[in-house]
Image: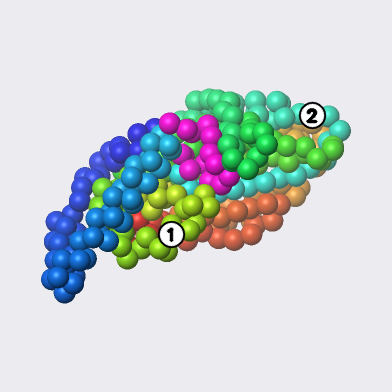
Amino acid sequence: MDLLDSKNVNNRIRKRTIALAIFVHLYLSLMTFGFWLIPLTIFGVITSALLRNDIDEAVSSANSFNKALPFKYFGVVYTHIQHVFYHPIKIENDIFDTIEAELKIRTPIASLEPIAITDKDKDLRAYEKRDFLKGEAKSTQCGTTLTLLLNQSSFGAVRSFEWRVIVGGYVDKDAKFKLIAYSPFTFLFWIGAYLKRETNLLGRVRTVYSSAYNNVDVSTQVRCISETVFDAMVVALDKNGIDTSDLKAQKLQSMNINISGGKVNMGNVVQGAMNKIGAAVSGAKA
């Protein structure tokens, strides 16, 4: 995954962004007799270094994270669906095989590859690893990637299956410039959460390009992937004699949501609805 690959989008620093930054800092420098250049330099260098570290870490560590944000490499979780059922025998391999077969038939996702993601939180006595299956689709013409992650867990004989559709964008050079140029104004607002590992700077500059056609492409692909996984789950559970009436109801509820961007979590009932893609990436565009 190339975080700088914007495909058909001209990824650049806009002239008006540079002009406005020059005007603001020149004005503040004149008003403070040049002392403004000191915090500008200090905060700018620190922000640039931390951002570079986050980008390098995301590129090199798709399989690990520290305490929070386990899927930061892939992007933002747009759809998180969980289904829980009882069955005395482990049937996860059958379910995953059925999902993979349906994805091959219906979508450009050719296979599901195993991936282990490890929490390397320094407060843990031992690193904690969870196994997932990953499927990737080709990026849209505007550089937006879609990744499907599936995982299974058990609590006694109760089985929990989860799948996430994760949407990733490219590193917006204009947003990156703004973050560094205006760091003296924003630094104190995010540094606390950053030091607690509750956020990272990559999310502030990674952009899902907001355009009418890209919105349609992302919406279509998210819905198609979710529809396929739902149908495959129904087939696999029916084959093993498990009642799927609640799963079918869950599908009807979730697929009636207008998936046009943002973030939604769904368990056995729908718990929210998505916002528009433009709102989801407004932080990066601001």
Amino acid type assigned to the residue bearing label 2 in the image: Lys
Residue depicted at 76% across the width and 29% down the height: 91
Residue 55: horizontal and vertical position, in percent?
Answer: 38, 40
Residue 81: horizontal and vertical position, in percent?
Answer: 63, 47
Q: Is residue 106 visible?
A: no
Please give left or right for residue 3 compared with residue 174 in the image.
right
Please give left or right for residue 45 compared with residue 233 in the image.
left
C-alpha span from label 2 to label 1:
44 Å
Mark 1 sits on what residue? 190
- What secondary structure do most residues of the magenta stretch adopt? loop
- SS at circle 1: helix
Q: Is residue 144 magenta?
A: no
Residue 148: horizontal and vertical position, in percent?
Answer: 53, 37
Give whichever of discs 2 and 1 has the lower sequence position.
Answer: 2
Q: Which numbered circle lies on residue 112? A: none
* Vertical comparison of 68 with 3: above or below: below
* Vertical comparison of 1 with 197: above or below: above
Please give left or right for residue 97 compared with residue 2 in the image.
right
Quarter residue 286 falls in:
bottom left
Residue nearer the viewer, 283 or 237 = 283
Q: Which numbered circle lies on residue 90? A: 2
Q: Quadrant of the N terminus?
A: top left
- SS at circle 2: loop
Q: Is residue 66 magenta?
A: yes
Residue depicted at 53% across the width and 34% down the height: 64
* Vertical comparison of 79 with 272: above or below: above
Amino acid type assigned to the residue bearing label 1 in the image: Trp
Which residue range is magenta in the image? 60-74
Q: How many marks?
A: 2
